[in-house]
């Protein structure tokens, strides 16, 4: 039996990165960049107005107020997309729209709400006719309401590092930089095989002693959440030939997951079958609860549809529904993310105050299903009821896992424990 940390180290050292592929930017949500993105241009590409208003020289607005407005001559209109020829002189302004280029001579923009438009014909004070004028009711600061060229992103800057999972904002930046297609890691393929004579398809009538296959469904969705592609291999009976035949169907994938049949019962055949198939078994049994009976190994790549030379990872996950989920969370998920070079796990871990006493077995790391919430400046955490490894409801009610170290035996209410959020 090995410790969780050692098991994880062995798994990660067996992980090989998957290849990259080019995909259209529009389809890139949740995909993992496989190259660093440096900006090919400044964003914004030119100084432009952040407001609808008037481009002015800030010095022409000195001391302007509601009672003593400054009057400026409006020499042109500049819409977004225009390329203005005009150049502002003293006491002149240009009407300007959001996103439009700041004309030469202007150094600030006053928002339209702080001005009043005056048409020349009706404006008697100056005696000039036909011209347009604007009254300015407020002083502007130098550079006010101007978005400077490159203020968001400078040309050459590292904008998104390789290994990042793309979100909507990243995609927007890549669009602004004109990248209509990008390089991402291909999605790892992960096969799932449920095992057990008692396990039946979910649309079948429940006969005595049978139970429906929930593990395939939880694992399938956990795989999707990691950004990988699940392949359902169905259910195999606890019969050596059938098990081997079914497992072989997963050899075109990067990872094969089996559930059940890895404990010490008479019909727990998975480990032996894997060994017979030539799997290099790296460990069996991990010092944790739930999830102790876990087999991990690698098997040579036999499929021509995959890149040669990369071994497949095989996880014989425990059959109990909670154990299967937790083992996935602790071991399979990091393996999948690392295949796409996502070394930074975004799961948040915090210290939380335990709201109940917990007794545990020494030597095992515990992953308790918990509900954790923020109250009066601290996180509080409590388990979500009975923690049996078959009680999937405990997982459904949880937003987090309380992680208790191997050496602990009794943890008292009020003590701070490590909690990992699940989503
Ligand atoms: P095993 O390790 O095969 O003895 O399985 C442990 C427990 O998990 C048993 O109670 C099984 O009935 C249950 N189990 C195994 N496979 C599944 C599955 N695919 N879905 C739900 N429960 C399962
Ligand atoms: Mg079984």
Image (tube, rainbow, N blue to C red):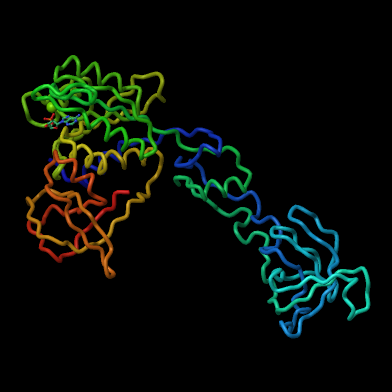
Q: Is residue 374 above or below residue 400?
A: below
Report the front residue among 102 and 310: 102
Q: Quadrant of the N terminus?
A: top left
Ligand 1 - quadrant of the structure image? top left
For this view, does 286 lie left or right of residue 420?
Answer: left
Q: Is residue 244 above or below residue 96?
A: above
| Residue 140 position in % (x across, y down) | 70, 76
For this view, does 57 lie left or right of residue 225?
Answer: right
| Residue 275 position in % (x across, y down) | 18, 24
Please report the residue visible at 27 percent of the width from the left and 35 percent of the height from the top. Answer: 218
For this view, does 223 lie left or right of residue 147?
Answer: left
Q: How many numbered marks appear?
A: 0
Spot the residue most to the top: 241
Query: Which image quarter: residue 203?
Result: top left
| Residue 238 position in % (x across, y down) | 14, 20
Report the front residue among 347 and 136: 136
Report the front residue among 362 and 114: 114
Spot the residue most to the front: 122
Please report the residue visible at 51 percent of the width from the left and 37 percent of the height from the top. Answer: 27
Please report the residue visible at 13 percent of the width from the left and 41 percent of the height from the top. Answer: 389
Q: Is residue 15 above or below residue 357?
A: above
| Residue 61 position in % (x across, y down) | 75, 79
Q: Is residue 385 above or below residue 149?
A: above
Query: Which image quarter: residue 274?
Result: top left
């Amino acid at each position: 039996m090995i410790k969780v940390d050692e098991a994880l180290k062995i798994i990660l050292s067996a992980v090989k990165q998957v290849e990259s592929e080019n995909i259209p930017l529009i389809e890139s949500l949740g995909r993992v960049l496989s190259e660093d993105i440096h900006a090919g241009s400044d964003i914004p590409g030119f100084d432009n107005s952040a407001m609808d208003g008037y481009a002015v020289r800030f010095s022409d607005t000195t001391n302007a107020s509601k009672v003593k407005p400054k009057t400026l001559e409006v020499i042109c209109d500049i819409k977004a997309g225009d390329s203005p020829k005009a150049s502002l002189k003293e006491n002149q302004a240009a009407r300007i729209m959001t996103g439009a280029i700041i004309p030469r001579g202007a150094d600030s923009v006053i928002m339209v709400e702080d001005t009043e438009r005056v048409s020349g014909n009706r404006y008697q004070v100056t005696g000039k006719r036909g011209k347009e004028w604007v009254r300015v009711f407020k002083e502007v600061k130098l550079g006010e309401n101007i978005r400077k060229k490159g203020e968001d992103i400078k040309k050459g800057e590292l904008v998104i590092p390789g290994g990042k999972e793309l979100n909507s904002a990243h995609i927007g930046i890549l669009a602004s930089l004109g990248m209509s297609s990008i390089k991402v890691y291909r999605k790892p393929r992960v096969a799932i095989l449920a095992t057990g004579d008692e396990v039946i398809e979910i649309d079948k009538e429940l006969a005595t002693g049978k139970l429906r296959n929930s593990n395939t469904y939880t694992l399938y969705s956990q795989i999707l959440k990691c950004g990988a592609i699940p392949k359902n291999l169905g259910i195999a009976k606890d019969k050596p030939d059938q098990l081997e035949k079914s497992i072989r169907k997963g050899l075109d994938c990067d990872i094969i997951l089996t559930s059940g049949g890895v404990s010490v019962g008479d019909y727990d055949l998975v480990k032996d079958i894997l060994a017979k198939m030539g799997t290099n078994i790296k460990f069996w049994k991990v010092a944790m609860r739930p999830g102790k009976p876990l087999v991990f190994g690698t098997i040579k790549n036999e499929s021509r549809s995959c890149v040669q030379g990369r071994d497949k990872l095989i996880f014989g996950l425990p059959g109990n529904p909670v154990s299967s989920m937790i083992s996935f969370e602790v071991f399979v998920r990091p393996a999948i993310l690392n295949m796409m070079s996502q070394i930074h796990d975004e799961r948040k871990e915090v210290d939380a105050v335990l709201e109940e006493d917990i007794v545990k077995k020494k030597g095992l790391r515990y992953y308790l299903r918990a509900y954790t919430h923020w109250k009066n400046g601290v996180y509080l955490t409590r388990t979500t009821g009975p923690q049996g490894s078959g009680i999937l409801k405990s997982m459904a009610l949880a937003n987090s896992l309380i992680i208790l170290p191997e050496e602990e035996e009794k943890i008292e209410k009020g003590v701070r424990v490590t909690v990992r959020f699940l989503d």
